[in-house]
């Protein structure tokens, strides 16, 4: 009996859809099974507070989507996806009422940095210039480099701890805090080796491609990917939860856009005990506690510059950001957590009724934390935007448990598919990366390289691994 499909993909997040697209582009018959009734995984949007207010349920700002080699080769604008680019990519306010902005221009950004202007320019300009050759090698598994000079220049700084790097590289406290805010997206304590890499990549992306938002919300990214996939002949089945390999129709291969914990549950009985042990030992990272607000006006930032960016980092000084992220790794929280905020309705009026606005913000908390961070987060916003609370019409909180309930891949509220430590970044979830000991079974989630983010590269690399291993004979 012939297989109805060449490949099955379990999970319709950006990585699952990326894997499906890459397989379908090679002429394979592919079906995607999604447990929820809506596709998208971490790239979804819905009315979380009041009617007419569109909020992103997880990801909101997408530099990796426009900077990813996978997305670069798609014409998703033909399928309704439009990115909106704010005047500035990032704002980092301070207690004195000033703010630093990340501009597309390295020079314009560096001009704000006083004694660090030259040091910042010398650090970022080569990376911005080389991003096109760096991206394929940084956004994937360990491999032999084709650009040793550019990779070495990146790696010598990237391998360092961010806490040590900023203190040795920059003189100005404001510059140190600005860089640390970009690093803190990693959900890692800033004293860990390799954390500088996250700041370098995100700042480079800000200069090279920007930190845009999708018009209409993150759901539009998923919808465009799905439409592209269906145009290639692919099929998507929603409300189709897979509990075991036996639930799947016959196919040449299966790619799972899920994390190790779910993979053990679904396929563990077919894996060797040693592989299950490695999957069970996989470390999940800190969680997110998120708030979404419906507002009756824009956020009243003390630093007016903050209205130029969709992304605002609320952390004040380097010391404060360090303390916040270190506490989380010790299983604690601070009264002044580092808060990542996004204000999309300033630049995309479709997100809220006329004259109204949305705000999205989260802080890191220990995995599985039950601590309510609502007051701490709102205190941080109010600190830099006095009068903010008076503009709140409604709020919705998403705890770590609710994150996982909404999306099983967010184990304990971990939005990155696992801790992005230096030992668990390029060889995640095991040294096999996308492959498993079972022929035809692969992993394509953010628990594989290069990890979290809406970039599709986990699915891209997993699909090409499957094409090489499962469809390697002539004519297949």
Image (tube, rainbow, N blue to C red):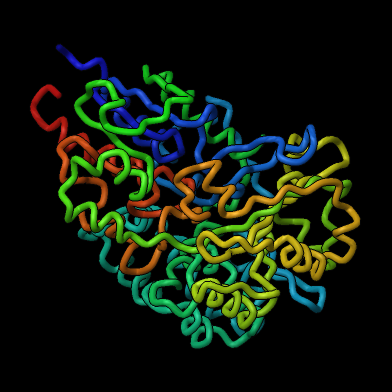
Residue 303 visible in the displayed image:
no
**At which x and y percent is residue 311?**
66, 57
Q: Position of residue 133 (x, y in %)?
A: 35, 55
Q: Would residue 325 be found to the left or right of residue 360 on screen?
A: left
Left or right of 437, for residue 56: right
Residue pictured at 28% horizontal, 54% vertical: 279
* Quarter occupied by the C terminus: top left
Q: Is residue 60 above or below residue 39?
A: below
Q: Is residue 387 visible?
A: yes
Q: Residue furthest top?
A: 1
Residue 399: image location, x then y, percent: 62, 54
Residue drawn where x is 73% and y is 70% of the image: 93
Question: In the picture shown, does residue 297 fall above or below 175?
Answer: above
Q: Position of residue 235 (x, y in %)?
A: 39, 19
Q: Residue at x 29, y 29 (%)?
A: 23
Q: Nearer the viewer, residue 120 or 406?
A: 406
Left of 326 or right of it: where is 9? left
- Of 185 and 65, nearer the camera is 185
Residue positioned 33% across, 66% down in the render: 150
The quarter in which the N terminus is drawn is: top left
């Amino acid at each position: 009996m012939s297989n109805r499909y060449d490949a099955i993909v379990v999970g319709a997040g950006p990585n699952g859809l990326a894997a499906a697209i890459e397989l379908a582009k090679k002429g394979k018959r592919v079906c995607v099974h999604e447990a929820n009734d809506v596709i998208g995984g971490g790239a979804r949007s819905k009315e979380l507070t009041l009617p007419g207010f569109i909020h992103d349920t997880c990801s909101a700002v997408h530099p990796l989507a426009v900077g990813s080699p996978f997305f670069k080769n798609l014409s998703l604008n033909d399928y309704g996806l439009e990115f909106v680019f704010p005047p500035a990519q990032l704002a980092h306010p301070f207690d004195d009422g000033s703010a630093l902005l990340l501009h597309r221009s390295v020079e314009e950004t560096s001009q704000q940095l006083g004694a660090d202007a030259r040091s910042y320019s010398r650090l970022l300009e080569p990376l911005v210039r080389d991003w096109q050759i760096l991206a394929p090698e940084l956004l994937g598994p360990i491999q032999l480099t084709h650009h040793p000079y550019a990779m070495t220049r990146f790696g010598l700084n990237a391998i360092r701890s961010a806490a040590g790097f900023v203190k040795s590289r920059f003189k100005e406290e404001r510059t140190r805090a600005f860089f640390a805010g970009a690093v803190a997206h990693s959900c890692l304590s800033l004293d860990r080796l390799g954390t500088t890499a996250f700041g370098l990549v995100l700042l480079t992306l800000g200069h090279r491609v920007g930190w845009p938002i999708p018009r209409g919300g993150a759901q539009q990214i998923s919808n465009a990917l799905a439409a592209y996939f269906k145009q290639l002949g692919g099929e998507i089945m929603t409300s189709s939860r897979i509990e075991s390999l036996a639930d799947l129709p016959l196919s040449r291969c299966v790619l799972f856009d899920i994390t190790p914990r779910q993979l053990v549950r679904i396929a563990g009985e077919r894996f060797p005990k040693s592989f299950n042990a490695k999957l069970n030992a996989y470390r999940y990272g800190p969680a997110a506690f998120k708030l979404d607000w419906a507002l009756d006006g824009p956020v009243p930032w003390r630093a007016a510059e903050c209205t130029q960016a969709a992304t605002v980092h609320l952390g004040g000084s380097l010391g404060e950001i360090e303390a916040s992220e270190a506490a989380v790794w010790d299983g604690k929280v601070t009264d002044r957590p580092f808060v990542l905020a996004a204000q999309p309705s300033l630049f995309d009026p479709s997100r809220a009724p006329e004259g109204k606005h949305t705000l999205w913000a989260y802080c890191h908390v220990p995995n599985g934390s039950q601590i309510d961070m609502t007051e701490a987060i709102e205190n941080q916003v109010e600190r830099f935007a006095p009068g903010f609370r008076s503009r709140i019409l409604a709020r919705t909180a998403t705890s770590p448990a609710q994150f996982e309930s909404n999306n099983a891949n967010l184990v304990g509220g971990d939005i990155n598919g696992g801790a992005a430590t230096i030992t668990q970044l390029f060889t995640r979830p095991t040294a096999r990366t996308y492959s498993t000991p079972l022929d035809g079974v692969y992993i394509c989630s953010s628990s594989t390289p290069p990890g979290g983010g809406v970039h599709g590269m986990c699915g891209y690399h997993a699909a090409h691994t499957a094409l090489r291993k499962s469809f390697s004979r002539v004519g297949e």
